[in-house]
Image (spheres, coloured by chain):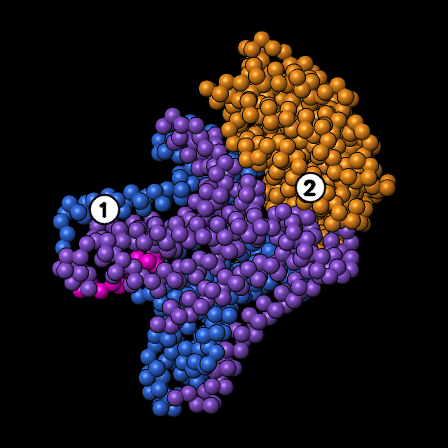
């Protein structure tokens, strides 16, 4: 068979490499294919040159696949990874199960006290830090200053939802494929539901009352969805119901969105002249509110954690301390410029005069500081988490609810139908989970 | 062919067939073209077909970012290993079914095929637990065995249909000459069965190469094949059409080329020998 | 002709394949069965005890169950019809004399080699994207509003993608069948002056019956379990949640292994119902 020759050669190569790998420890790192993470891979030589006995194996996956893989692995105790990239949703749940290794003993020069309190709080359970933040984000309004100016409007630093609608209407120019506002519509707990849950907070809505009863039948959720649908149907881009973060980013970079309310990390992408056609025209404002004391912004940190059961805990800690250190930030700044350093994790970064020159630095910090995962809503709730509810059932439930809302956005059902279905399925699932 | 056709008719046929052929091929062509564009050109409005600055930049970026060679090697080893294992198990089974058919031979064949209908998602958890117990997660061996099991029914069935076409008299003659069972298989049967085995190998190599559920869920770094390679290029932040196209082209090119070169065997393989 | 000895040798030779497949079927299946009677939530500490048939009733009574069975059948059925009808037409065209037949055949067969993940990604982003997709540009060129493929025409989109992947397979097999059609028979029919349509129904179609059966059988096996195409494009929203995808959501997204396992058992039952029907027909047709 023609196949045979390359095969034997291939297996010989495989054997040879296996032989060489004996002496060193291999860290298997599961990470998401975000720009910051890809950059980290590129710079990892700095780490391996300092630690020649540690070899890094990267498993870079798209976000949905990554989540599926790491959750499956940690739940079934597969032990395939030594470092996992996880978010503020997973950390409290996994930490409470003792599935993660505590990072309280990272070296002193790592400077845990420098981590932004809001971010650190979200990653700490009972005094144990279970993951180190690689970058943190909130959400904010990114808008086109040139279009606002042309419309004779000005965006306040702290807009209300009424301001948002006015701006969207003014900038909307569908003839020229400029849409007033781009928001997430793609179904998923980390996609449209992240946005809508945070938005509902600003309207006084909540997922559950103090007895864990679902609240989708409340007038607050109805107002939230009505406002959202109104914005998207009148001023949104076509196909909004399949747009997630990436789709909207690409639309905004092409100059097709007047305004976009999304993760603060997007700021460095939309102001990067290499990828963005509107790099020098973007303004920033806090996420909108409704005068109720809560804003519609979330809090998230992509973080690095070590699953309990990893056989290279010490090496993994070394790596995490490197990747989330001040030195790493300086390394990125030196090679890629300050605008590209991983944002939102350290106080010292925001005190750095070099970084303060970055146009979105201040608004990012203000957004992060204004989110409170421990008291996310107007009315009291039994859960923590701003744009999520930190219980294991949430991801599954919220993805299904997200599908109902997404279908409503696509015009396949009314807001009332979507809310009724959301209420029914949430109640059902919560009962099944024994609440 | 005895049928006569006018040149006109032939022109029409040619035009129609080429149009449809190109239409069907277009998504692949478009992907390949896009892989040579810049990210901005990839989404240009109106779309640009051929007249742009051809560049290998995307390939450079992809090669720099991922260890393509290792993914490729894993794909080759896993897919290749699974078909070789499969053939070793399937040849004797297919042989006995074809030449010593029993009362239940056909039922066994149909039952084998029906195991392919088990939903993979439903048994992911059990398999995962078994793999942990046996230390097979992220190992080429584990994945090779799984893919072999998945394709085994098809391999058996295909070989069975090929073997049945081999005239029994030849075997009788060999037996008369005092050939043992082993000799019968090695010296008589195998040479006659080579074309059938070749196309069986080929089709199942393609199926194993493209399998995306188990290969993604049971691997991490060491054994990850091209399906995992692709998962790191789908919808990252920002513009990605061109890089995705380059990665896609790199993932499908080996199998596309292999498939094209061996088209004839494939047609035979695909039809399970039942259509001639 | 078969001696007693060769019979037992035959059994011995069959044994590895049978035992392997039996193990491959029984071990995971019995574990799935075991889990399906348990409340098993890995994120809540794993095994939380026996719950009898609760998982089954919950899975069936959930509002997502019947729509998912329906979605599965619609996708399988539609793709089968499309690939077979278009496959027959295309095979008949390719059978005609023409220039460059070999190259056309290569073009037509190409999609079959493309990984499902890749083809879903390419279709989703580069064709069906309502802003940057080629379809959107095409629609705008004709002055039409672009279709939001994956949300407004979600089922159609998935069926299109899957059909594109499987049309080559159907075409190729049907083409081989047509090519083997006896030229003399056709000529005789032509001499009789039989109209094209009746020629097709009385001569071509019956001749292809066996090939069509094979296409149905093989495609059915693969279509019942399509996953990548949905995972990449709609993630099961807009009514495209198939039974396979529903189970995936239960097991992996909700990490409810008990409930998902019950769903898995239902999927096995559904697959077997279809298999029995299919095998009956195929078994008859294949032996001829």
- Per the picture, the main secondary structure of the magenta-coloured stretch is helix
Question: According to the colouring, which chain is blue?
Answer: B
Q: Residues within 10 Å of mark 2 (few under 14, many from 20)?
A: some
Q: Residue at x 36, y 33 (%)?
A: B49
Give the residue number, with chain letter if any, for mark 1. Answer: B14
Location of residue C178 in the rendering, given as x and y in whole percent from the top left corner: 28, 59
| Drawn side of residue C235 relative to residue A313, left or right | left
Question: According to the colouring, which chain is orange?
Answer: A
State the CA–CA distance, disc 1 to disc 2: 58 Å
The reply to whether label 1 and label 2 mark residues of one chain is no
**Range shown magenta:** C172-184
Determine if residue A429 is in view.
yes
Label 1: state its secondary structure.
helix
Q: Colour of chain C?
A: purple
Which quadrant: the N terminus of chain A? bottom left
The numbered mark 2 sits on a residue in which chain?
Answer: A
Position above or below: A205 against C100: above
Front residue of B246 and C154: C154
Position above or below: A258 against B267: above
The numbered mark 1 sits on a residue in which chain?
Answer: B
**Where, by quadrant of the figure, is residue A320 drawn?**
top right
Q: Residues within 10 Å of mark 1 (few under 14, many from 20)?
A: many
Q: Residue at x 77, y 36 (%)?
A: A208
Label 2: state its secondary structure.
helix
Residue that extends furthest to the right in the rendered view of this protein: A127
Q: Residue at x 72, y 27 (%)?
A: A220
Front residue of B34 and A185: A185
Front residue of A349 and B234: B234
Determine if residue B131 is in view.
no
Give the residue number, with chain letter if any, for mark 2. Answer: A424
Front residue of A22 and A176: A176
| Drawn side of residue C1 relative to residue A20, left or right | left
């Amino acid at each position: 068979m023609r196949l045979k020759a390359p095969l034997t050669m291939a297996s010989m190569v495989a054997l040879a490499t296996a032989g060489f790998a004996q002496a060193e420890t291999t860290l298997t790192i599961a990470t998401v294919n975000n720009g910051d993470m890809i950059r980290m891979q590129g710079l990892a030589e700095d780490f391996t040159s300092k630690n020649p006995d540690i070899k890094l194996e990267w498993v870079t996956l798209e976000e949905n696949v990554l989540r599926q893989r790491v959750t499956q692995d940690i739940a079934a105790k597969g032990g395939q990874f030594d470092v996992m990239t996880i978010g503020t949703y997973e950390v409290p749940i996994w930490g409470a199960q003792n599935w993660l290794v505590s990072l309280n003993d990272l070296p002193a020069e790592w400077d845990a006290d420098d981590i932004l309190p809001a971010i650190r709080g979200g990653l700490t359970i009972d005094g144990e830090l279970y993951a180190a933040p690689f970058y943190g984000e909130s959400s904010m309004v990114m808008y086109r200053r040139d279009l606002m100016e042309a419309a004779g409007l000005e965006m306040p630093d702290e807009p209300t939802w009424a301001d948002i609608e006015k701006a969207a209407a003014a900038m909307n120019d569908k003839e020229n494929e400029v849409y007033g506002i781009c928001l997430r519509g793609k179904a998923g707990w980390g996609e449209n539901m992240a946005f809508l849950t945070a938005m509902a907070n600003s309207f006084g809505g909540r997922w559950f009352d103090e007895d864990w009863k679902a609240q989708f039948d409340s007038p607050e959720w109805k107002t939230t969805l009505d406002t959202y649908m109104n914005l998207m149907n009148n001023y949104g881009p076509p196909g909004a119901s399949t747009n997630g973060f990436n789709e909207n980013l690409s639309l905004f970079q092409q100059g097709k969105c007047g305004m976009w309310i999304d993760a603060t990390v997007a700021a460095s992408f939309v102001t990067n002249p290499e990828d963005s056609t509107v790099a020098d025209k973007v303004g920033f404002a806090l996420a909108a509110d409704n005068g109720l004391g809560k804003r519609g912004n979330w809090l998230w940190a992509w973080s690095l954690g070590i699953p309990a059961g990893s056989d290279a805990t010490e090496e993994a800690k070394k790596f995490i301390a490197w990747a989330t250190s001040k030195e790493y930030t300086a390394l990125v700044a030196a090679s890629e410029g300050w605008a590209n350093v991983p944002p939102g994790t350290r106080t010292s970064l925001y005190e750095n005069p070099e970084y303060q020159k970055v146009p979105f630095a201040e608004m990012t910090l203000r957004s992060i500081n204004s989110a409170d995962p421990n008291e996310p809503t107007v009315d009291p709730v039994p859960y923590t988490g701003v744009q999520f509810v930190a219980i294991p059932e949430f991801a599954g439930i919220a993805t299904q609810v997200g599908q109902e809302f997404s279908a409503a956005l696509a015009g396949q059902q009314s807001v009332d139908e979507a809310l009724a279905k959301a209420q029914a399925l949430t109640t059902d699932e919560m009962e099944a989970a024994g609440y | 062919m005895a049928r006569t056709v006018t040149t006109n008719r032939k022109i029409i046929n040619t035009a129609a067939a080429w149009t449809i052929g190109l239409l069907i091929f277009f998504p692949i062509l478009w992907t390949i073209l896009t892989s040579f564009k810049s990210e901005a050109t990839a989404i240009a409005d109106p779309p640009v077909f051929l007249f742009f600055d051809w560049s290998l930049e995307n390939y450079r970026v992809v090669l720099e970012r991922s260890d393509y060679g290792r993914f490729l090697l894993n794909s080759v080893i896993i897919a290749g290993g699974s078909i070789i294992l499969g053939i070793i198990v399937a040849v004797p089974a297919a042989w006995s079914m074809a030449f010593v058919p029993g009362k239940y031979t056909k039922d066994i064949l149909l039952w084998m095929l029906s195991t392919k209908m088990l939903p993979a998602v439903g048994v992911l958890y059990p398999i995962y637990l078994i793999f942990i117990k046996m230390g097979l997660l992220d190992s080429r061996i584990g994945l090779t065995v799984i893919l072999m099991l998945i394709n085994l029914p098809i391999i058996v069935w295909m070989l069975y249909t090929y073997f049945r076409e081999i005239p029994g008299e030849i075997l009788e003659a060999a037996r008369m000459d005092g050939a043992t069972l082993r000799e019968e298989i090695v010296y008589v049967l195998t040479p006659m069965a080579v074309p059938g085995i070749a196309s069986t190998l080929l089709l199942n190599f393609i199926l194993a190469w493209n399998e995306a559920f188990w290969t993604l869920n049971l691997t991490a770094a060491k054994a990850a094949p091209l399906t995992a390679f692709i998962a790191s290029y789908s919808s990252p932040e920002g513009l990605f059409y061109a890089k995705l196209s380059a990665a896609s082209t790199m993932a499908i090119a080996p199998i596309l080329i292999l498939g094209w070169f061996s088209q004839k065997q494939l047609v035979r393989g695909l039809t399970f020998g039942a259509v001639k | 002709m078969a001696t007693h000895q060769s019979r037992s040798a035959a059994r011995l030779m069959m044994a590895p394949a049978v035992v392997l497949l039996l193990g491959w079927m029984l071990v995971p299946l019995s574990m799935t069965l075991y889990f399906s009677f348990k409340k098993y939530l890995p994120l809540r500490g794993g095994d939380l005890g026996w719950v009898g048939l609760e998982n089954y009733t919950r899975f069936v009574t959930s509002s997502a169950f019947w729509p998912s069975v329906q979605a599965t059948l619609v996708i399988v059925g539609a793709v089968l019809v499309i690939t077979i009808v278009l496959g027959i037409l295309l095979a008949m065209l390719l059978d005609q004399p023409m220039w460059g037949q070999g190259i056309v055949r290569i073009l037509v067969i190409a999609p079959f080699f493309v990984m499902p993940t890749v083809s879903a990604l390419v279709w989703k982003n580069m064709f069906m994207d309502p802003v940057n997709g080629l379809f959107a540009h095409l629609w705008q060129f004709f002055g039409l509003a672009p279709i939001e493929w994956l949300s407004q025409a979600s089922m159609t989109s998935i069926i299109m993608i899957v059909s594109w992947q499987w049309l080559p397979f159907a075409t190729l097999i049907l083409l081989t069948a047509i090519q083997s059609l006896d030229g003399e028979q056709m000529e005789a029919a032509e001499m009789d002056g039989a109209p094209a349509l009746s020629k097709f129904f009385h001569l071509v179609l019956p001749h292809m019956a066996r090939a069509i059966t094979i296409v149905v059988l093989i495609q059915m096996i693969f279509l019942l379990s399509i996953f990548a195409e949905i995972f990449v494009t709609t993630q099961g929203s807009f009514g495209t949640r198939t039974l396979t995808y529903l189970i995936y959501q239960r097991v992996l997204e909700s990490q409810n292994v008990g409930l998902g396992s019950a769903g898995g058992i239902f999927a096995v039952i559904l697959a077997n119902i279809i298999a029995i029907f299919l095998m009956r027909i195929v078994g008859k047709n294949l032996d001829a």
